[in-house]
Amino acid sequence: MEKYWHVLNIGLQNTLVYRMNFLFRATFGLIPLIAVISVWRTIYEGKAGGRIASYELTQMISYYLVITIVDALTAVTEDDWQVAADIKDGNISQFLLKPMDYLTYRLCLFGAGRLVFAAVALVPTCAFIWLLRDNFVLPPDAATAAWFVVSLVLTALMQFLLSFTLALLAFWLLEVATVIFIAFAFEYIAGGHLFPLDLLPPAVAGALDYTPFPYMLFFPVSIWLGRVNGDALWLGVLVQLLWVVAAYALARLVWSRGIRKYSAVGG
Amino acid sequence: MNMNGEPRIPHGESSAAHGGGIPHSPFAIRHYLSLYAALWRNSVIRELGFKANFLMWIIVEGLWFALQLTFIGVLYLHTESIGTWTKWQVVALVGTSHLIQQLFTAIFLTNLTALSEHIRTGKLDFMILLPVNTRFLVSFRQVDLGGFVNAVGALCVISYALHRLGHTPGIAQVVGFLPLIVVGIVIHYSLMLMLCASSFWTVRAQGIVWGYYNLFNIARLPDEAFRGAFKAVFTFALPMLLVSNVPVKLLVDKLGSPFEMLLLVSLAALIFAASELLWRTALKRYTSASS
């Protein structure tokens, strides 16, 4: 579809305006990263075995570095606020008239935003990883790397679709910021942002497996670190794919409901 | 309602008559207190207009606090200590950091982040014209009441952590703890004011709040986890590793020497002075938004 290429192109140009902002974000984001790595180093120093829940120090540090990479490529930053604002300000009306699908349009803008952010973040992040190169592991082989990429794309889609759906709540609610922050809090901890999920008691970690959260960050990171092997690998990717399909269906459903409500109000 | 007769909005004739003399006369403190009371009243009325939203924000903040505590809980599933810090000492630290952050949010945060908007739209002109100290107005215009509710939650967590430590702090420790909290708030306030004042030079300064939250992140971690240049920068230049660590160390008998408290207080004074200097320089070069 050629028109969506134009959208992508416009998205790239629009987000390039924010490149300095992105650079600051990526650079300042390293401060908490350094902090959490320092805390883990201190913990490992006090530990005789050199292992915590099957993580060696190198793997633990790599875990947080890979999170930074995945985050740069998949995290939703502004898109949900923009969708909510489009609905509140009535900008959504024009998409009902144009032969353009709003979800696809938004997906293109999200993709463009991530590409620009990743390009800008590349320099500070790579410099930082290079400083820690002794403690940074690469995927064990090419096949694992390929699986990582597949899982990364699915993660990005899940991140986008769930944020999109939450933002659509603006059809019904005056203020969606609190709802988004609450959902983000759950994703933050249950997705593995703060710590690897297998540090949790097994019962809790097992229960989390039945939610979409681990597939929004923890799963691709585990693939990179070579901690998911054999059948678990393709089965995991399959589950992730199912979550993407489910999230897509939900987004479509909420959208069609919302539009009905919207037209009713707008008259 | 109990303040009938007092000037409601700072353009009453009484304040105008005093002109530039206000900040120095003893009458000024009473004047500014009554002014602040009026600003408080406005904030309460504003919050009452959005009750559900007010409650939701308290839930959001409470949830993020719980998240930090969960992180500590999970860390201590796998270790006995971080340096010499035990689990409940770190919980007290996270609580104290949250206490400082929430009080700062309640009193200052919205006001400071609004500054760049006031500059961009030229609203600052109006504030400069009012017969009150502009920095006072910029800093205290609005109160975020939810922050106080969350601060109470933080106090509860600190008390519970002390209870689990089996430690009852002495009077002197509590009396020392409270002013150190105020000192911590002053540090956050002055640093944030300086960051926000940068919008006098560059119009786009949105990333600031986000950037500053990264610093809050460090403040709740035990100082012993850090070393080298990182520790030096965040102790002596941006004293994030002192702000909540020092009061907690005082409270739980961990203080190496009283020198640490002295360092915290003198750095706070230094940073506050620097912020005043920067503020004056910035105001001097302010040339309004339009024409």
Image (cartoon, coloured by chain):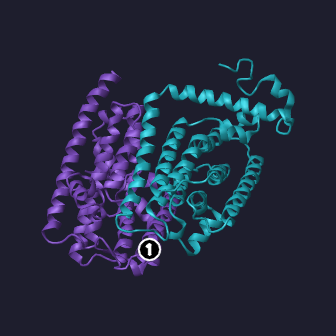
* Left/right of residue A17 with respect to residue B67 in the rendered view: right
Can you say whether A218 is above or below B29 in the image? Answer: below
Q: Residue at x 39, y 47 (%)?
A: A79
Q: Hue of chain A?
A: purple
Question: Of all residues shown, which one is farthest toward the left?
Answer: A231
For this rendering, which residue is in front, A78 or A31? A31
Q: Quadrant of residue A84?
A: top left
For this rendering, which residue is in front, B17 or A265? B17
The answer, for residue B193, to whether it is visible in the render is no
Question: Which quarter of the rendering shows the C terminus of chain B?
Answer: top right
Residue where numbered disc 1 is placed: A41
Can you say whether A181 is above or below A133 in the image? Answer: above
Kindly identify which chain the residue marked by label 1 belongs to. Answer: A
Looking at the picture, which amino acid does disc 1 mark? Answer: Arg
Residue A160 in the image: state x and y as whole percent.
Answer: 31, 50
Q: Hue of chain B?
A: cyan
Residue B70 in the image: state x and y as whole percent.
Answer: 38, 55
Can you say whether B56 is above or below B207 in the image? Answer: above
Few, some or many C-alpha atoms within 10 Å of disc 1 (few <14, some 14-19, many ≥20)? some
Q: Residue at x 14, y 62 (%)?
A: A235
Question: Which quarter of the rendering shows the N terminus of chain B?
Answer: top right
Tag 1, which secondary structure? Answer: helix
* Left/right of residue A124 with respect to residue A73 in the rendered view: right
For this rendering, which residue is in front, A86 or A185? A185
Query: Total label count?
Result: 1
Residue B224 in the image: state x and y as whole percent.
Answer: 53, 70
For this rendering, which residue is in front, A3 or A173? A173
Residue B250 in the image: state x and y as whole percent.
Answer: 60, 59
* Left/right of residue A126 with respect to residue B10 in the rendered view: left
The answer, for residue B50, to whether it is visible in the render is yes
Can you say whether B233 is above or below A78 in the image? Answer: below
